[in-house]
Structures are given as C-alpha cells and as structure tokens.
Image (cartoon, rainbow, N blue to C red):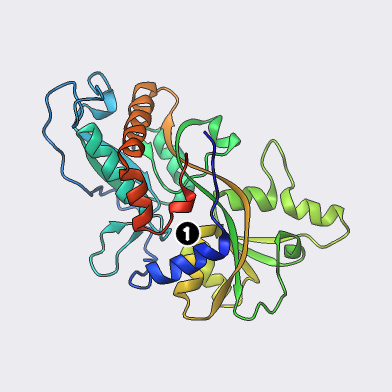
C-alpha cells in the first residue's frame, strides 16, 4: 500500500488544539487485569457483526474476546484518561471498531512495552496493539496488520539550548528513549545492523551518543525535564503531545525521522486471526469509519491508503 506522511508543523498545531483536555498517565504497571473497552455484540455463530467476516474456526476469538497487550502510556496513541483512568487514544478507538466488525469484545491489558512481544509469544495476549512500528527486525518474529504511519520526533528543553536541529546534532548528547522502541534501534543499531546513529557519529570523528533507556515514555520525558538528558526521542505524534503538555518547558524539533507504519502484531501461527483483522480494517477503511477515527484524534495525515 502507498503511504503518506503528515507535515510535521501542521501536526504540532493540530495536537495543540486537540489534546489540551487530556493528560498522560505515568502508571505503566502491568497488573494482569484486562480492561474491556467495548461491549461484545451478539452475532450468529460463524459470522461477523455485519455478516461479512467469518470468524468461526479462529481459536483466539472462540471466547468472544480479542485480547490486546499494550503499553498504555503513549499519548495520544494510547493512554489513561486522568478523569476516568480508562484507556483512550487512537489505538483504543480503532481496536474497538475492529472488534465490533468482528462481533467480539476488545480487552486491553497494560504492560511494559519491552515485554509485549515475549508476552504475545507466550500466548498471554491474542495480539499487540501499542504504536508498534512494523520494522523489518520485528517482522522476523511476528506478522503485522499495518494501520498508521509515523516517524520519530525529537523534543528538547524550551529555547533549544544545545541547538539540536536534526539527528546529526545528537552526537555527543544524552538522549532519553523508551526501552525496546525503534528509537533505540535508530540510535544504537540492531543485531543485523549494529551501531546506529551513535556509530555514525564516531565514524565521522564526533563523540558517541549517550543513550538513556527507560521503561516508559513518560519516564524518558521526565529525564529530559529534570536535566538528566539533552533530548528525548519518541514517535513524532507522541513527542509533539509531550511538548504540548509541558506548559512551555519543552519544544519539538519539526522534522520527522524515518516515517514507518504501525502494525497490529500477530503470532505467525495465527494466520486466520491476521487475515480476519486485515479484512476488518479494510471494511473500516471502505466505510469511512477508519478516517473518522483518525480525524477524531487529529491524526488523519498518518492514514494508510
């Protein structure tokens, strides 16, 4: 599928107007208690809610529940509403819509991002939906149903005292990131392609990047605000939201890095579930519901075509 990417400055402006009423919850403890975010709909056996997608014979859905593992501390993609302590965000709304099409109930279980794929492999979740970039390395472990596009963003203290304008300016700097994310891969490299941006700095005669890793994105942002880090990296819409929520303490560098798709992660053995989710997503796209959900979060420019 062809993909398009939103202008960075426009996204920041949209986020500022759209998310002022929300705040990100720092609690990322996995208490093992799933959260049902929509009621299951009664449908005839072997049919979906609209009678178009046959889910009979899909083991993961036999109980009428789509169990979703997620790190619900990544606003505006998924986070806990301060007023209700309920999950909200793009992934939550889209998961509910997908579940409704399939005639089942979406249940989110909160967990630390770095532990989500092992938990999926251990069959503690049916799928992972957590702003997870469908990277080539992850595709060796799981299959993906791709549903959104986002690059990485950099946030810095107000006034940008270090003069950071791009990833090239991170050489010799302390950069806070969330453990297990594509931002770690970008800075340090992967098993197949070690070194990353930090090694590029060294090869160019500059100092290496000091990568500070944290269990959650809010912890990484706090490290920046406390002076422990010079910059923080996260997915661009999340970084923009963090800057907006900082009440002027932080600002975002208006350049996206390496835009790539988010995907719903599915075990490679769960081919029937993967295909059903893809069919449900296609139905939401065709009906206009997908576009409406993205518009609700002012993230329409991250839509897949």
Q: Residue at x 57, y 39 (%)?
A: 135
Q: Residue furthest right?
A: 205
Q: Residue at x 27, y 43 (%)?
A: 97
The quadrant in which residue 123 appears is top left
The picture places residue 44, in percent across and down from the top left corner, at 11, 24
Apparent side of residue 69 relative to residue 101 in the rendered image (left or right)? right
The picture places residue 283, in percent across and down from the top left corner, at 32, 33
Q: Residue at x 33, y 51 (%)?
A: 293
The kind of secondary structure element at disc 1 is: loop
The quadrant in which residue 98 appears is top left
Apparent side of residue 165 relative to residue 22 in the rendered image (left or right)? right
**Residue 219 visible here:** no
Q: Nearer the viewer, residue 246 or 223?
A: 246
The picture places residue 106, in percent across and down from the top left corner, at 25, 42
**Residue 47 visible here:** yes
Residue for badge 1? 216
Q: Residue at x 16, y 44 (%)?
A: 39
Q: Residue furthest top?
A: 57
Apparent side of residue 36 relative to residue 250 in the rendered image (left or right)? left
The picture places residue 225, in percent across and down from the top left corner, at 55, 76
């Amino acid at each position: 599928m062809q993909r398009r990417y939103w202008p960075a400055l426009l996204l920041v402006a949209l986020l500022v107007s759209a998310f002022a009423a929300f705040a990100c919850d720092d609690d990322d403890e996995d208490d093992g208690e799933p959260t049902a975010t929509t009621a299951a709909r009664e449908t005839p056996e072997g049919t979906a809610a609209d009678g178009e997608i046959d889910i009979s014979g899909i083991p993961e859905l036999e109980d009428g529940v789509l169990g979703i593992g997620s790190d619900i501390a990544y606003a505006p993609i998924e986070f806990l509403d301060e007023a209700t302590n309920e999950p909200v965000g793009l992934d939550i709304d889209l998961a509910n819509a997908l579940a409704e099409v399939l005639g089942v109930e979406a249940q989110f279980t909160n967990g630390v991002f770095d532990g989500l794929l092992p938990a999926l492999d251990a069959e503690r979740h049916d799928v992972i939906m957590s702003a997870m970039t469908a990277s080539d390395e992850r595709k060796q472990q799981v299959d993906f149903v791709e549903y959104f596009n986002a690059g990485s963003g950099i946030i810095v203290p107000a006034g940008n005292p270090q003069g950071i304008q791009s990833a090239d300016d991170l050489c010799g700097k302390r950069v806070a990131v969330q453990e297990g994310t594509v931002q770690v891969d970008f800075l340090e490299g992967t098993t197949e392609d070690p070194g990353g941006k930090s090694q590029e700095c060294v090869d160019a005669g500059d100092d290496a990047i000091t990568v500070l890793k944290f269990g959650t994105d809010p912890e990484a942002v706090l490290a920046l605000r406390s002076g422990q880090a010079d910059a923080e990296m996260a997915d661009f819409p999340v970084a923009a939201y963090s800057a907006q929520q900082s009440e002027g303490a932080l600002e975002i560098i208006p350049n996206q890095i390496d835009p790539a798709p988010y995907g719903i992660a599915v075990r490679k053995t769960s081919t029937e579930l993967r295909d059903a989710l893809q069919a449900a997503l296609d139905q939401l796209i065709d009906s206009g519901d997908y576009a409406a959900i993205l518009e609700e979060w002012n993230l329409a420019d991250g839509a897949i075509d």
